Amino acid sequence: MWADAGIAAVKSLVMLLLALNLTLVLLWVERKGSALIQDRIGANRANIFGGILPFNLGIVNTLIADPIKMFTKEDVIPDGADKLLHFFGPFLAVFPVLATFAAVPFGDVLVIGDRTINLQVADLNVGILYVLAMSGLSVYGVVLGGWATNSRWSLLGAIRGSAQMISYEIAMGLGLIGAILTFGTLDLQAIARAQGATIWGVIPAWGIIYQPLGFLIFLVAGIAETKRVPFDLPEGESELTSGYFTEYSGSKQATFMMSDFAEIVVVSALATTLFFGAWQVPYLARDGFHFPGGFALALPQLVVVAMQVVSFILKILVLCCFQILVRWSLPRYRYDQLMDLGWKTLLPLALANVLLTAVIIVLAG
Amino acid sequence: MLDQYLGVILTFGFAAVIVGIMCGASMVLGAHHPSAVKQQVFECGNPPTGPARGRFSVRFYLVAILFIVFDVEVVFLYPWAIVFRRLGVPGLVEMMVFIGVLAAGLGYVWKKGALSWD
């Protein structure tokens, strides 16, 4: 009993630290990536004590210096603001995003002695519903955070943000139904295992092969949920100063900024789990590689598990980088275009995708 | 059955602690020098006039109502999607009727202009 609880606690901490570290690394990738795209050098003044080191500490120091700077700033709460909600706004923007990771599998099973550990924090049979419920909660962070500050910009940003998030949530929920039809379960670990199969013995049976349109809908809706360019109207700094977090400073503002990046990681993790084979490495089974053509390569169990976890992280990183590329490549939508895309394009497309998938499944038997 | 939710509860706890520390760090570590000007909300340099929590466009309410309507329909699709392979053709026909009604509703609000922002 206590051993189970301990294992669950370790898994939970590992997953949370993985998510947080990916988020922090993304901050660095964003700064350097945007510099690369815009032909700048980017953040390059990272050293300690006025540069006593002859080399650039780069990523490490930026990841430490930025949080320390943010955490030691003054926490300004404007007049007329609701002090309690001013705290719970950023809290609710990040907390549900982190909680989402409880249902995401990050590897197959790890066998230690006679104990089989499922590499997933909580093996929920309603995994997708849990994830959707949690990501739906983060809209409260935006609404309450914006409303609490008693600022016009914040309120406008909060209302825009909530309308945008709930509009794209429908497209996202409908877009995932195609994947559920394909796999016949809501259990994310079962979905991950199902993607270890191959089509005609060669092509890995990843979700994107069955659900290309579903993936596209999920990705667009997911980027809209992260509230970043081209869907950054809730923040739109040229019209709303900073949208719903205009009146936040210090660590609360850092938390709001982090929520965007944490959402990128969540969207990438879900897209990986549902459409890109989760932790699967092509042709890698629990006892080693089984290539098409009968060639097999046995591997120790620990190596297999390590390769699965690394493959999961790499897939997430590739999708994260893609979203950052999108963010720095596209201009912002107008609000009517945003609503049109969500309600008039993605929603009918998602309905069509559900029907198409159902008909194909019936025809294929 | 409930022990699978142990991980969820633990994750909730850890996440709450981590995010709580992140949100509260400035309150503890940061300086605290309030002044009348600093506490003013930002309105492009002008002194703010009146309360901020005023009225806003009715379209946002419309979006919220449409969200509730369509989100409930989406929830109905989930159980069907799981058992679909066992239902076969009758399940497909039934859900085609349901999605047809849903599409008709979407067409109606579309025609009525509830989805256009201008």
Image (spheres, coloured by chain):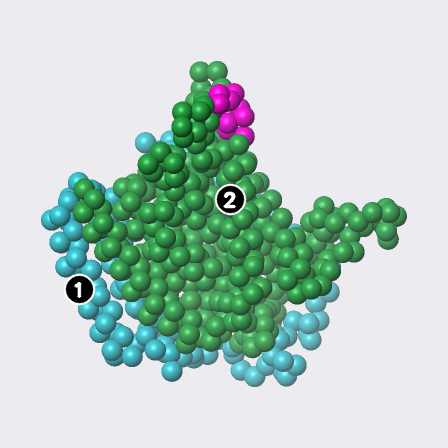
Chain colours: A green, B cyan
- Give the image quarter of residue B31: bottom right
Residue sitting at x 50%, y 27%: A304
Note whether A163 is above or below A299 in the view shown: below
User: Which structural element holds mark 1?
Assistant: helix
Note whether A73 is above or below A121 in the view shown: below
Q: Could you confirm whether marks 2 and 1 are on the same chain?
A: no
Is residue A313 shown in magenta?
no
Tell me, yes or no, if residue A140 can be seen here. no
Check the residue under mark 1 and report the chain it is in.
Answer: B
Question: Which residue in the structure is indicated by mark 1?
Answer: B101
Residue nearer the viewer, A157 or A81:
A157
Hey, what amino acid is under mark 1? Val
Region of the chain picked out in magenta, as a range? A297-306
Residue sitting at x 43%, y 53%: A135
Furthest-top residue in this view: A113
- Give the image quarter of residue B39: bottom right
For residue B12, the mark is none
Residue sitting at x 46%, y 27%: A289
Is residue A303 shown in magenta?
yes
How dense is the environment of label 2, judged by Cα within 10 Å: few (below 14), some, or many (20 and up)? many
For residue A315, the mark is 2
Q: Where residue B46 appears, x then y in whole percent?
A: 63, 83
Q: CA distance from mark 2 to mark 1?
A: 39 Å
Query: If the image is split into quadrants, where does the N terminus of chain B sit?
Result: top left
